[in-house]
Image (cartoon, helix red, strand yellow):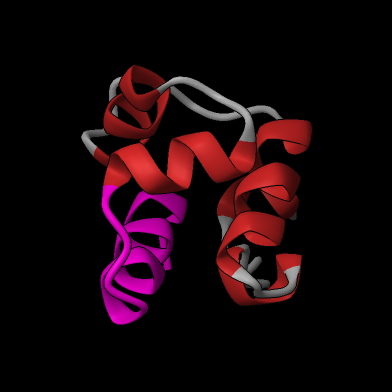
Amino acid sequence: MVIKYAIAEKRREIRMTQKQLAKKAGISTAMISFIENDKRQPTFFVIASIARALGVTLNELVIIRDSYKFFK
């Protein structure tokens, strides 16, 4: 799953707005929007902050598949 979909899906599951997520994660609302619209790739620390704010583990947001060519 691509990170933008995982974040948006989890956020909607718990009925949280982008603004609420941004405030809880300590980042800007614009950054959440950029990530969900694939205009920015978040750093590890931003992903960790978002995961914490959503109440999920990093594993739930980031799934690495062995089939990706750049990992071979």
State whether the magenta stretch is mostly helix, strand or loop: helix
Residue 11 seen by the camera: yes
Query: What span is colored magenta in the figure?
Result: 1-17
Say which residue appears at 68% left-offset and 72% top-offset.
66
Say which residue appears at 27% left-offset and 72% top-offset.
15
Location of residue 39 in the rendering, given as x and y in whole percent from the top left corner: 29, 21
Residue 35 lies left or right of residue 15; in this view the side is right
Q: Specify the quadrant that holds the N terminus.
A: bottom left
Residue 5 on the magenta segment:
yes
Say which residue appears at 65% left-offset and 66% top-offset.
64
Residue 60 lies left or right of residue 20; in this view the side is right
Closer to the camera in the image, 33 or 28:
28
Reply above or below: 56 against 24: below
Location of residue 48 in the rendering, given as x and y in whole percent from the top left corner: 75, 48
Say which residue appears at 30% left-offset and 24% top-offset.
34
Reply above or below: 57 against 19: below
